[in-house]
Amino acid sequence: MIRRKRIPRMLHSITGILLFALIMLVLLSMSAAALEKLPVLTREEFDLWPELPEYTIFNPFPGKGGNCTWYAHGRMMQLGYSKYALDSMRFNANTWAGAADRGAYVTDSPQVGSIAFWDSYQFYGSALGHVGVVEEVKENGSILISDSSSSGSAYRTFSVSPGDSRWPTSFIVVPEGPEKSLLFSPGTMVRTTAYSLNFRQEGINQPSLLLPKDSLIIIKDHVSNGIYASRPGSTSSYYYWWYGTTEFEGEIRHGWVAEEYLEASGFNEPAPSPAPNPTPVPVYIYGDVSGDGTIDVRDVALIMQSNLNLTLLDNDQKIAADVNGDGKIDVRDVALIMRYALGLIEALAD
């Protein structure tokens, strides 16, 4: 049984107005920030690169795991930019700006999702030049860049401002690639339609397998499913690719195969048996509307967005948002959360 703190029935109108104004400023700043930056790759996410085809079998550059051209090509593909355009830049970093083609162009203005380019001797004296990816353009004109190898680390991010000696020579803007294919879904069993079809095994420098016609493959869930990419070693032949498992010479193999040579087999992978007691007992933290384990202005923003019909709260979020327990989600709940976040009260419910 949860007991809730008693609260005044009415708040001063001026307090409500000030709170509303503060929340709207927060919402506006959050929206503006969303337009100026990408979800920056974390080190933990980067460490999964050996499982991603953008960094392995579809990446034409050597030095995988610690090379600026390898990383920039892979990161741009991961973000959904055109591999056809990226493949016009296939050699040392100092050649990229001059080689950019197929819709890619060079500019002096940084853009989120563009390639930061340094000519020869412009980045710590490197004769081969350097490339990275612009992750964020800040209001003060500085930019956040992610790259590889320049610092002796496989992955890092750093900020640089205009006029700094490390400011890029120019920026390469690459067009977006086509949307991922949605032809298949995880659990679908497909059949190969070509003889000696290349099944590109996942991982680093793994050999391809030649599957006989009518081989069966089960499509598995993967973040890169349906990706549009070239055949390894080719700049002209492009396919949608799917991740799956197949049996080959008595062993289960995992890898990638081109959609063009697949068809639905009419069979699907059996659904797993439901686990016992599959429905967990919900645990609610009153005030934590976002579900991130903390109670702060983000929770306030979600409630205000809901009241302005800009977003919908699910049932768990509604329970967490009604901190005063009156069955309504309004400015009274907002005021309580703000007071708690500011340390003016010790608890929302007890």
Image (cartoon, grey):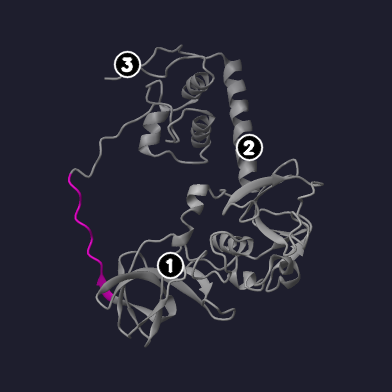
Observer able to see residue 37: no
Instruction: Check disc 2: other Cα within 10 Å, few if <14, some if 14-19, many if 20+.
Output: few
Three-letter code, disc 3: Arg
Q: Position of residue 116 (x, y in %)?
A: 70, 57
Q: Nearer the viewer, residue 34 or 123?
A: 123
Q: Determine contact: label 3, label 1, CB under 8 Å.
A: no
Residue type, label 2: Leu
Closest to the observer, 202 or 204:
204
Q: Residue at x 69, y 62 (%)?
A: 173
**How busy is the neighbourhood of tag 3: few (under 14 within 10 Å), some, or many (20 plus)?**
few
**Which residue is identified by label 1?**
182
Front residue of this view, candidates 333 and 264: 264
Figure label count: 3
Name the residue rendered at 60%, 68% in the picture: 82
User: What residue does disc 2 label?
Assistant: 28
Q: Is residue 2 highlighted in magenta?
A: no
The quadrant where residue 21 appears: top right
Above or below, 12 relative to 275: above
Quick one: label 3 or label 2, which is nearer the N terminus? 3
The residue at the far right in this view is 163
The kind of secondary structure the magenta stretch mainly shows is loop
Please, what secondary structure does the residue beneath circle 1 have? loop
* Residue 286 point in image, percent of width and height: 39, 26
Q: Which mark is residue 3?
A: 3
Q: Is residue 252 among the parts visible in the rendering? A: yes
Asked if the residue at tag 2 contacts the one at tag 3, i.e. Cβ–Cβ closer than 8 Å, the answer is: no
Quadrant where the C terminus is found in the figure? top left
Left or right: 268 as drawn, with respect to 312: left
- The magenta-colored residue range is 266-276
